[in-house]
């Protein structure tokens, strides 16, 4: 099967050796994503805003890979403060309420920058879409 590595252009991709997303066949894995826009952190101190920004970034990566949020079968959320689960869950629900992928929300001791409150990964399986007649 053909492998396609998709880059977001972030400098860390070449420094660390990863891709924003990788597609093999109909499976797409999206790397851990934080609320970074270049050197700027979006939603600093606000877990809800960070989650929304991250999910929009994941959606954009999926579109580039030929998929959509409707193809997502799993998300993994790594959070630095599990007591903020409701605001994180509310943002996740705004993107996935009708899709309902399998998910995990796990508290971790820290992320790569202490200003990041959450990092999210996603797995998608692209289903063949047929034209209706």
Image: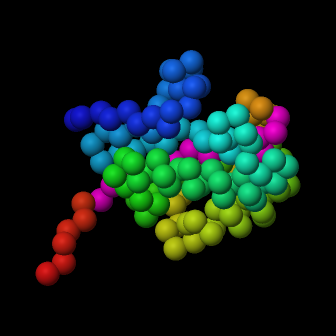
Which residue is painted at 45% across and 34% down in the image?
7
Tell which residue pokes out farthest to the bottom in this image: 133
Tell which residue pokes out farthest to the left in this image: 133
Image quarter of residue 97: bottom right
Residue 72: % across, % down: 46, 56
Which residue is painted at 37% across and 55% down in the image?
67
Which sits in the foreground, 77 or 95?
95
Count every numbered label the image shows and give the total.
Answer: 0
Which residue is painted at 72% across and 52% down in the image?
50
Image quarter of residue 94: bottom right
Compared to residue 77, the image places residue 2 above or below, namely above
Q: Quadrant of the N terminus?
A: top left
Q: Specify the segment rendered in magenta.
A: 114-127
Image quarter of residue 5: top left
Residue 39: % across, % down: 70, 34
In the image, residue 116 lies in the stretch drawn in magenta: yes
Compared to residue 18, the image places residue 128 above or below, namely below
Q: Is residue 109 left or right of residue 122?
A: right
Q: Is residue 84 visible?
A: yes
In the image, residue 61 lies in the stretch drawn in magenta: no
Q: How is the image coloured?
A: rainbow
Residue 110: % across, % down: 79, 34
Compared to residue 130, the image places residue 26 above or below, namely above
Q: Quadrant of the C terminus?
A: bottom left
Q: Is residue 107 visible?
A: no
Q: Is residue 77 left or right of residue 123?
A: right
Which sits in the foreground, 14 or 102?
14
Q: Is residue 62 left or right of residue 76?
A: left
């Amino acid at each position: 099967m053909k492998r396609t590595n998709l880059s977001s252009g972030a400098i860390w991709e070449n420094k660390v050796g990863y891709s924003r997303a990788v597609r093999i066949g109909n499976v797409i894995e999206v790397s851990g994503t934080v609320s970074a826009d270049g050197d700027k952190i979006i939603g600093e101190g606000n877990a809800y805003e960070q989650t929304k920004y991250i999910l929009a970034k994941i959606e954009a990566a999926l579109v580039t890979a030929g998929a959509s949020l409707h193809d997502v079968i799993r998300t993994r959320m790594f959070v630095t403060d599990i007591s903020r689960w409701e605001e994180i869950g509310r943002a996740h629900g705004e993107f996935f309420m009708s899709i309902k992928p399998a998910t995990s929300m796990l508290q971790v001791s820290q992320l790569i920058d202490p200003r990041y409150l959450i990092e999210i990964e996603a797995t998608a399986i692209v289903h063949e879409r047929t034209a209706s007649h």
